[in-house]
Image (cartoon, helix red, strand yellow):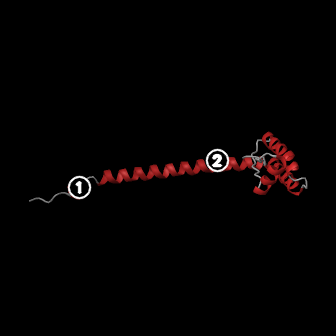
Amino acid sequence: MRPIPKSVRPDLLGRFDQSFFLKMVVSFLVFTLAVAVGEIGIRYVLVLREFQESRPETEAAAERLANDVRTIMLNRGGPVASRTIYPILQRNFERAGLQIAIEPTESTRTSIERLFQFTPRGIPP
């Protein structure tokens, strides 16, 4: 009986096909990962650039909001002052394309309901 040549042995059959398939799958996954990382990197750079360009406007808007809220909190006028200032805040920040939310506390709601017979809603987000 003649020995079976090495290239025809059953344990080696299909080895090239399996190897080729694995290389293709690995190559595809690496390429997909590289594309995803590149796209995320480009988006990050664009968002960072946009943030840097709008930073003065953002800081000015944040400072205005902080001053307005501080004015409300320090104002001795209580519910009347907040009733006047909330619409101004909402209008200013809607004009700037920003969203803020100011919700009155339970004690503020109670005192306004008792004094002015309406329920304050504040500024929804």
11 up-or-down from 21: above or below: below
Which of the 4 quarters of the picture holds residue 70? bottom right
Q: Quadrant of the N terminus?
A: bottom left
> In this view of the protein, which residue sits in the foreground, 63 or 43?
63
80 up-or-down from 2: above or below: above
- Which tag is nearer the camera, tag 1 or tag 2? 2
**Disc 2 packing (10 Å; few <14; some 14–19; many ≥20):** few
Most distant residue in the right direction: 76
Q: Residue at x 45, y 49 (%)?
A: 28
25 lies left or right of 13: right
Q: Residue at x 24, y 54 (%)?
A: 13
Instruction: State whether residue 85 appears in this view.
Output: yes
Where in the figure is residue 26, as x and y percent of width and height?
43, 53
Residue 43 is labelled as: 2
User: What residue is disc 1 on?
Assistant: 7
**Disc 1 packing (10 Å; few <14; some 14–19; many ≥20):** few
Where in the figure is residue 114, as x and y percent of width and height?
81, 51
Q: Determine the secondary structure under disc 2.
A: helix
- Looking at the picture, which amino acid does disc 2 mark? Arg
Q: Determine the secondary structure under disc 1.
A: helix
> In this view of the protein, which residue sits in the foreground, 79 or 85?
79
25 lies left or right of 55: left
Q: CA distance from mark 1 to mark 2?
A: 51 Å
Where in the figure is residue 27, as x and y percent of width and height?
45, 51
